[in-house]
Image (cartoon, rainbow, N blue to C red):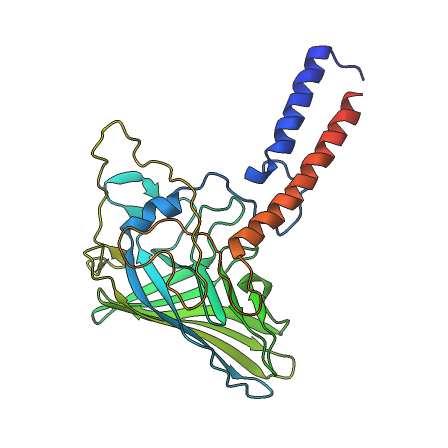
Amino acid sequence: MAFTKSVSILALAGILKTAFAQDCGSSFVAFGYGGANYWNCDPWIDSSMQPYLAWYNGTTSITHGGGNCNDPTVFKTMKNAFAIGGQTVPGNSSLDRSSYDKNPYYILFPSASGADIAIHVQSSTDDYYTELQHWELGATKSGDGFDLTGTFIGKVPSNNYFYWPGTSCRDGGDIWPNFGYEDGIEWGWTLSGHVSPDAAEIEILYTNTDSDGMKQTTSVKYSGTAGKDGGPRLSTAGDFPTSDASYKAPEDPTDPSPPPPTQSSGSSSGDSSSASSATGSATRTSSTSSATGGSTAANAAAGRASGMKLGVAGVLSVIAGAIFLI
């Protein structure tokens, strides 16, 4: 079958555009890999909404329990932050997660590490194209705030990540919840806790039941208090958690509203607080946790994995395109 020169040029241009744009999406999947979470090179909702969340400063500890050797390991406590808020920001219709996140609210533990543990937990994110919601969340009004519930539903790599060292009874290292961590007959990750305008108590529990019926657990517990700097606070006026913040337009009316944020990187090493603390004006953070034993970065690893796979797809598509045009 012959093609005119103009048709051939247009076809080649299309193939090249597809091949070299693969790091920024999954529109071309002929040579893609199942299970990849394709990277979004222009995310901005996460970071633009962070200043409108209710932030808490506190500490996280990780504890093992149960198992065939009754491992009671309690790892050191690290300092980190927690944030919670609604799916929209009043006053700016473009700040809205609801198109890809069906939860009634949003939670975030920014990437942080301390001593020998690390975590990064996010209920949803616009960092990706393929799978954007990772947790299914619920809330019930209780006392001075809300009782929270959650189940991890992610199927592909995401920003959700943990690190703890191995022990005499347990494997350790870099742990992404969607991989199950262990190959038990039953396993899962759940979230529970309570938040009020003044404090947050959260537990993320990993449970694994092996073929012998032995149950092992790993508990990730967070305890924090609200920021004291006048930033947004948790609002209990509605049926679900949100903050009392509303959008404030830029003083310069020629500025975009909201502006796509500049990508920035934050890191936390040793026993340090997360780069996004309870200030009410948090900035975008990247997962650069470094814990004793060789913890890796969840975001960077997932991004590199997708980029490498898609880069191969690009090369193969160029070759296929050249053969097609010959």
Q: Residue at x 65, y 50 (%)?
A: 34
- Find residue 82 and report its horizontal and vertical position in percent: 34, 62
Closer-to-camera residue (189/277): 277
Q: Residue at x 56, y 65 (%)?
A: 175
Relative to 27, does residue 57 appear above or below in the rendering? Answer: below
Side (left or right) of 164 relative to 182: left
- Find residue 87 and report its horizontal and vertical position in percent: 33, 50
- Could you tell me which quadrant the N terminus lies in? top right
Q: Quadrant of residue 92?
A: top left
Identity of the residue furthest to the bottom in this view: 69
Identity of the residue furthest to the front in this view: 270
Q: Residue at x 54, y 64 (%)?
A: 177
Residue 308 visible? The answer is yes
Residue 25 visible? The answer is no
Q: Residue at x 52, y 67 (%)?
A: 163
Q: Quadrant of residue 293?
A: bottom right
- Could you tell me which quadrant the C terminus lies in? top right
Relative to 66, does residue 314 appear above or below in the rendering? Answer: above
- Find residue 38 and report its horizontal and vertical position in percent: 56, 45
Closer-to-camera residue (182/256): 256
Side (left or right) of 322 relative to 17: right
- Find residue 270 and report its horizontal and vertical position in percent: 45, 67
> Total number of numbered labels?
0
Q: Quadrant of residue 120?
A: bottom left
Relative to 57, does residue 127 appear above or below in the rendering? Answer: above
Side (left or right) of 130 relative to 89: right
